[in-house]
Amino acid sequence: MRFRPLAHAARFVLAAAFALAVGACGSSAPKPPATPIETLRAGATQLQDGEALGRWLLGELLVPGGETSRAQSARTALDKAPNKGLYGSLARGFDNDSRGRFRAAALAYLDAVDAARVSDHPDAPMVAWFAATHLLRLRSSVTNLWDTGRPTVLKSLDQPGNIGWRARGVLAEWWAADGLRKETATPGKDSQDIMAERFGCVAKARLAGPFGHLAASDHRVHYDAEKPGPWPRVFAADPRRSTRPRVLATDRNGCHFSPAEPTEAGIFYTETFVDLPAEREVIVAVQDVLALFVDDVEVLTRRPEESIVASDD
């Protein structure tokens, strides 16, 4: 697995959009189709079903045609329901959050993460991501939230179940911000090593470079490091520069790799190996790269110039 880091880091803020899918059954007699909010209301006939009541409450709060009075009725019924399921917890959290009841919202979002972890519902990863993102935001508004949420977060990091990789990444970010400094010291590991393990970062990698000759188009060129087979210690020289690209000594600090020796600017490659015990789907997340190769096949290409928006100024 090889990738070319970008020269400048870019930060991407992901926003999660949550959608409720509903269906209505027809009959032999023609009649106007039920609206989404009508379907949600009809599905909440069992006042002990927290999941149906949670969908109803979310519908009254978010779906066109929702009513404040009906939302209050849905919330009252939901609070009496015994179960803390996926949608029931999400609805409690969202309703409390929108009313400024931040501690109650955080507790409900933690319940939503717990429910998603053991749920087989296809929406579980999205619910967990939404809840985890809001928990990260609420950490500065709720006193001692980390101490309250620590058992749920650590369990979700170690046994994520069905929360999905996005939610797990957000929870790992929360743990790094508030929990890492409280971790018990592990002999032979510093805090950066522990953080790298939590985030699932690779432990070993090699760097090679610099390639190119500092031209604006260097990132469009395919260099020798992309060829199949083992890297040589030193690569072919570029006639336009005096320094030959080579395999570099590497320093690792947590999830970050950098050259351990002085080097000139240019295009650099990082190589690492991941062995799997069996064939499976995996997610490879890399930051600040121009291209990603898996088994010598380019699977991702980024062009910085394509992200530049023209200005009229």
Image (cartoon, grey):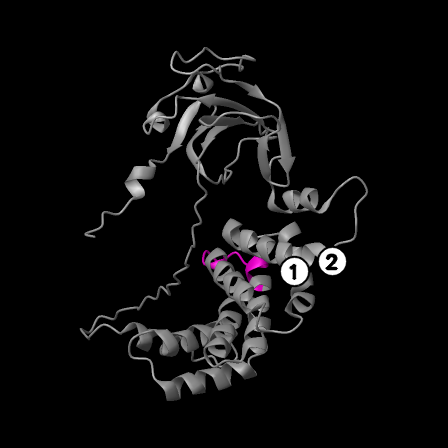
Tell me where the magenta segment starts and ends, as one range.
Answer: 115-124
Tell me if residue 186 is in the magenta stretch: no
How far across and down, in percent of the image, does residue 164 sit? Answer: 52, 51
Q: Residue furthest right?
A: 187
Residue 182 badge: 2
The reply to whether callout 2 and callout 1 are in contact (CB within 8 Å) is: yes
Q: Of residues 52 and 64, which is closer to you in this image? A: 64
Tell whether 193 sits left or right of 142. right
Q: Secondary structure at mark 1?
A: helix
Among the 4 quarters of the image, the one containing residue 248: top right
Q: Residue at x 60, y 46 (%)?
A: 199
How far across and down, in percent of the image, does residue 31 sit? Answer: 19, 75
Among the 4 quarters of the image, the one containing residue 224: top left
Residue density around tag 1, few if under 14, some if 14–19, many if 20 or more, within 10 Å: some
From the image, tell me which residue sits under label 1.
178
Tell me if residue 120 is in the magenta stretch: yes
Tell whether 244 sits left or right of 20. right
**Compared with residue 204, is residue 152 higher up or lower down, i.e. above or below?**
below
**Compared with residue 264, is residue 280 higher up or lower down, i.e. above or below?**
below
How far across and down, in percent of the image, does residue 57 sit? Answer: 43, 78
Q: Callout 1, which amino acid?
A: Asp
Residue density around tag 2, few if under 14, some if 14–19, many if 20 or more, within 10 Å: few
Q: Residue furthest front?
A: 242
Q: Of residues 8 and 185, which is closer to you in this image? A: 8
How far across and down, in percent of the image, does residue 256 sit? Answer: 58, 38
Q: How many marks?
A: 2
Q: CA distance from mark 2 to mark 1?
A: 8 Å
Inspect this view and state whether residue 193 appears. Answer: yes
Inspect this view and state whether residue 203 appears. Answer: no
Q: Residue at x 32, y 76 (%)?
A: 37
